[in-house]
């Protein structure tokens, strides 16, 4: 029969159903469309998966590059810090070797009446403060301890410190190893830490001209360089011999007549024979013990190095070195 293309027989129905050619063609197109959509969906799924993998790889690469950059920056910072540290150590060694022996010459320039002289220099791009000191122009804690005992020495040190903040006075003498009849017993205070505990060094050396280290020392033979001694140092060293009024008078005469010799200065004071004899033994006009503070600074911190050259001791020629 014309127009009869296919026959579909139902399982339960009797007879046949005629399907026109147009319907059959439409069904074929529908199947083709569904098949095409399936292929497009399959391709789209593959493309999305590749995109995710690319993004993951980019993220891993970025994290790896960030890690490499961070490691490189740390290495650069460490290299710069190592270079600065090497420069600082070289500066300290050179200043100690060249300038410490010239401390007396630096202190003697001008009027030469100060126990400390400061100089600011630049070495290798780093700012450095040099503090030249005459240790015999300062009251010796060992001499005060031998004369007054531990309590008396602590009292004198506290008087010198006064109202300076952040200073811990903690006298911790070494055990006595000399004989009682020794004319020059070994020192029981050999470092500033035995006197001031964990006090920061910047507190000890500042402010310029009136610092604690201008008036107190642990080194030297115990004599006092009169021409350079501060009023506080004279009070700490001489208060057991003469009173405060006589010390002020001595400072006044020294200021008016800086060229007078020590005997001539003492002649102008009304002293007992014992006081005169004690001052004749204590006061000197030459120094054999000098020091040099080398203070290096950076943007992050400061380093303090102290060298002491004591030509009156058995270790003359070998400086004592302390670092903070």
Image: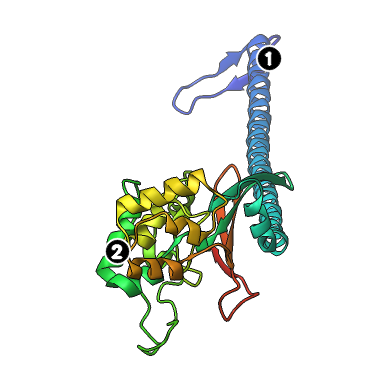
Percent x, y of residue 253: 45, 48
Query: Which residue was labeled with disc 2?
Result: 154
Name which quarter of the figure residue 315 lies in: bottom right
Specify the quadrant of the image occupied by residue 56: top right
Q: How many marks?
A: 2
- Sequence order check, earlier mark of 1 and 2: 1
Q: Foreground: 18 or 152?
A: 152
Furthest residue toward left: 151
Residue 25 disc label? 1
Q: Which residue is depicted at the point 49% across and 72% down?
A: 221
Residue 301: % across, % down: 54, 47
- Tell me what residue is drawn at x 69 percent, y 9 percent: 3
How packed is label 1: few (under 14 Cα within 10 Å), some, or many (20 or more)? few
Q: State whether residue 114 is above or below residue 182.
A: above
* Residue 108, position as x, y percentages in the image: 64, 53
Q: Position of residue 117 (x, y in %)?
A: 59, 49
**Which of the two discs, 1 and 2, sits closer to the camera?**
2
Where, by quadrant of the figure, is residue 148 drawn? Answer: bottom left
Q: Nearer the viewer, residue 17 or 212?
A: 212
Asked which secondary structure carries label 1, the reply is: helix
Distance (Cα) linking label 1 and label 2: 117 Å
User: Is residue 38 in view?
Assistant: yes
Regarding mark 2 in the picture, which secondary structure is present there?
helix
Q: Residues within 10 Å of mark 2 (few under 14, many from 20)?
A: some
């Amino acid at each position: 029969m014309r127009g009869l293309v296919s026959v579909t027989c139902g399982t339960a129905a009797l007879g046949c159903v005629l399907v026109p050619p147009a319907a059959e063609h439409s069904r074929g197109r529908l199947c083709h469309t569904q098949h095409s959509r399936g292929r497009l969906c399959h391709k789209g799924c593959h493309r999305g998966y590749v995109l995710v993998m690319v993004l993951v790889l980019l993220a891993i690469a970025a994290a790896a590059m960030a890690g490499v950059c961070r490691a490189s920056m740390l290495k650069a910072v460490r290299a710069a810090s190592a270079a600065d540290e090497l420069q600082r150590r070289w500066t300290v060694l050179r200043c100690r070797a060249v300038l410490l022996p010239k401390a007396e010459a630096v202190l003697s320039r001008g009027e030469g009446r100060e126990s400390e002289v400061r100089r600011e220099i630049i070495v290798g791009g780093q700012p450095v403060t040099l503090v030249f000191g005459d240790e015999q122009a300062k009251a010796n804690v060992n001499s005060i301890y031998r004369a007054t005992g531990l309590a008396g020495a602590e009292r004198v040190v506290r008087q010198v410190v006064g109202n300076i903040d952040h200073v811990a006075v903690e006298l911790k003498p070494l055990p006595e190893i000399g004989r009682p009849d020794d004319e020059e017993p070994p020192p029981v205070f050999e470092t500033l830490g035995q006197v001031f505990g964990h006090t920061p060094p910047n507190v000890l050396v500042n402010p310029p001209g009136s610092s604690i280290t201008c008036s107190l020392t642990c080194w030297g033979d115990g004599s006092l360089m009169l021409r350079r001694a501060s009023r506080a140092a004279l009070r700490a060293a001489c208060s057991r011999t003469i009173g405060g009024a006589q010390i002020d008078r001595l400072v006044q005469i020294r200021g008016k007549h800086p060229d007078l010799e020590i005997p001539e200065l003492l002649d102008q004071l009304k002293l007992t024979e014992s006081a005169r004899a004690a001052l004749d033994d204590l006061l000197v006009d030459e120094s054999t013990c000098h020091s040099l503070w080398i203070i290096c600074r950076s943007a992050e911190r400061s380093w303090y190095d102290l060298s002491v050259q004591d030509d009156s001791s058995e270790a003359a020629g070998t400086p004592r070195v302390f670092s903070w």
